[in-house]
Amino acid sequence: MKLFYDRASMRHWVAEQHQSGHRIGLAPTMGNLHSGHLRLLDVLRPHADFRVVSIFVNPTQFGPHEDFDRYPRTLERDLEQLSAVGCEAVFVPSVEEMYPYGRDPLTRVVVRDLENRLCGAFRPGHFQGVATVVSKLFHLVQPDIACFGEKDWQQLAVLRAMVRDLDMPVEILGCPTEREPDGLAMSSRNQYLSPEERQRAAILNRTLQQSATAIRGGLRDFRMLESSAMGLLQKSGFDMEYFSIADAETLEPAEEQTLQIRLLAAGRLGQTRLIDNRPVEDAP
Ligand code: PAF
């Protein structure tokens, strides 16, 4: 497995691969890898000759009071896992390497509207940080295809819009969310939960599923469904940010005629912020 720490050597290797006609796949991550991340590599396998995983805890997507400093960093174990599953290359830049002119670059990628909805309303600047670092990674690694987890559905929607609007020559694939046996979406942040919070956390997915089932069964009063789901989750100990039944692409509130509906939710259990989402289609 190739390991690159700086932009120049990453670019050089990628140029060589492209010259030999190889297709490059990229899975951007912030490390602390779990099986959800490893699944990104499985999804990329049939589409790429070489798969690159980037590991970079991006400071510009964390708010001033968020968990940048305590975000789990487990590089040695991450590299062992990637090597064990046959990943071809890993890009591990430092903050100085990615932001040599400072952490507040003059240029930012702004995906209007989409970046301010849902999570964006509670994490100002977050999606600008994500879109900016992902576009930098796309320029450095020049992937033909890149894969992101569906767990952060809004991130996927923002990045799809960015690639479309800026004519970036990269195909974006979504990777289905990996779940624990009780349905909790896998996330590096789950490890912040106390044992008691961990037990309660699966209610988030269950409520999304129940609401999706109700829609599948014909219920169309989406706003009523949203507020009863919010109420239920609040009662279960969540400090809810939103529970939204939305258009899967624009993330605007779904209307009766909306074709592709996505249910999305975010809330805090104690100190831990959890997000999850579900389509209507796979509800029982
Ligand atoms: O989803 C993540 O882990 C991050 O937001 C990403 C896409 C790696 C950008 O820093």
Image (cartoon, grey):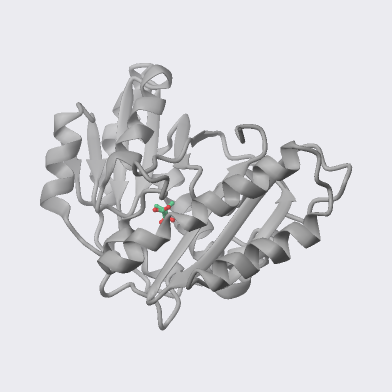
Give the residue displayed 73% in from the left and 37% down from the top.
216
| The image quarter in which residue 36 lies | top left
| The image quarter in which residue 160 lies | top right
Answer yes or no: is residue 24 visible. yes
Give the residue displayed 83% in from the left and 54% down from the top.
221
Please give left or right for residue 272 compared with residue 92 in the image: right
- Of 34 and 194, which appears nearest the observer? 194
Q: Position of residue 181 (x, y in %)?
A: 34, 41
Q: Position of residue 210 (x, y in %)?
A: 61, 47
Check the picture and name the quadrant holding the C terminus: top right
Please give left or right for residue 280 compared with residue 41 in the image: right
Compared with 271, 181 (above or below) is above
Answer yes or no: is residue 165 visible. no
Please give left or right for residue 233 compared with residue 249 in the image: left
Give the residue displayed 43% in from the left and 54% down from the top.
202
Q: Position of residue 277 (x, y in %)?
A: 56, 49
Q: Ligand 1 shows up in which quadrant of the image? A: bottom left
Q: Residue furthest bottom?
A: 65
